[in-house]
Amino acid sequence: MSKHGMVETEESAGERIARASEAVQRLTRWHDDFPSPGVRFADLTPVFADAEGFHAVIDCLGAVASDVDLVAGVDARGFLLGAGVAAVLGTGVVAVRKAGKLPPPVLSREYTLEYGSAALEIPADGVELSGRRVLLLDDVLATGGTLAAAAELFTSAGAQVAAAAVVLELSFLGGRERQGDYPLTSIRCI
């Protein structure tokens, strides 16, 4: 799909979503008590390592918002998603990094996780963000702090978060409620 993609039928959209959702369900590995006791970690590595699964996920995420100027992938698995979707859409991609991984100046946001706290950063210069429409991508939506912090970073830089999308949403953790008023899509929700 290019920035000027074809109009998709409801039937073909449903088939695309079903293929991606099935791959996520079938290939996700679950790890109890990782990275800390009481946390159940969803490892999407096997989904991304499977050619058909990865392609289905990228197709699905790319259809979320085809009219964006930039795709942003959240550290670290979001980098894979962001690059793939940006290539499909014909846009640039920006990596939303963990604190301390980018040279200054940076914009930074701290946030809480279900097992601690962290910070995300984006470049404060060198990449023109003001006025750009951004598609924000991450692998898993759990408590919602990571995605919300990334959205706040782009908003503070003058960009508009046109949409956000994740591969897997753990709805029982309530992360969707922490998001802004941008559309949020998940390929698979449990």
Image (tube, rainbow, N blue to C red):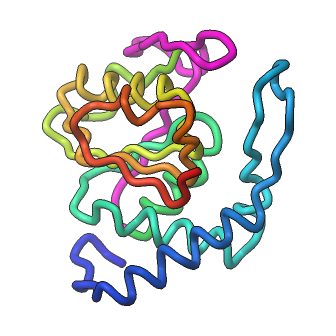
> Which residue extends farthest left?
131
Q: Nearer the viewer, residue 17 or 7?
A: 17
Name the residue located 58 percent from the left edge and 22 percent from the top edge: 98
> Which residue extends farthest front?
172
Q: Quadrant of residue 32?
A: top right
Q: Is residue 12 magenta?
A: no
Q: Quadrant of residue 154?
A: top left
Q: Nearer the viewer, residue 92 or 63?
A: 63
Q: Is residue 92 magenta?
A: yes
What segment is highlighted magenta in the picture? 89-118
Give the x, y percent position of residue 8: 28, 85
- Seen in the image, is 26 located left or right of residue 177? right
Name the residue located 58 percent from the left edge and 68 percent from the top edge: 21
Total marks shown come to 0
Question: Is residue 117 shown above or below 87?
Answer: above
- Seen in the image, is 171 located left or right of residue 72? right
Q: Nearer the viewer, residue 115 or 133?
A: 115
Give the x, y percent position of residue 57: 56, 66
Question: Is residue 189 shown above or below 47?
Answer: above
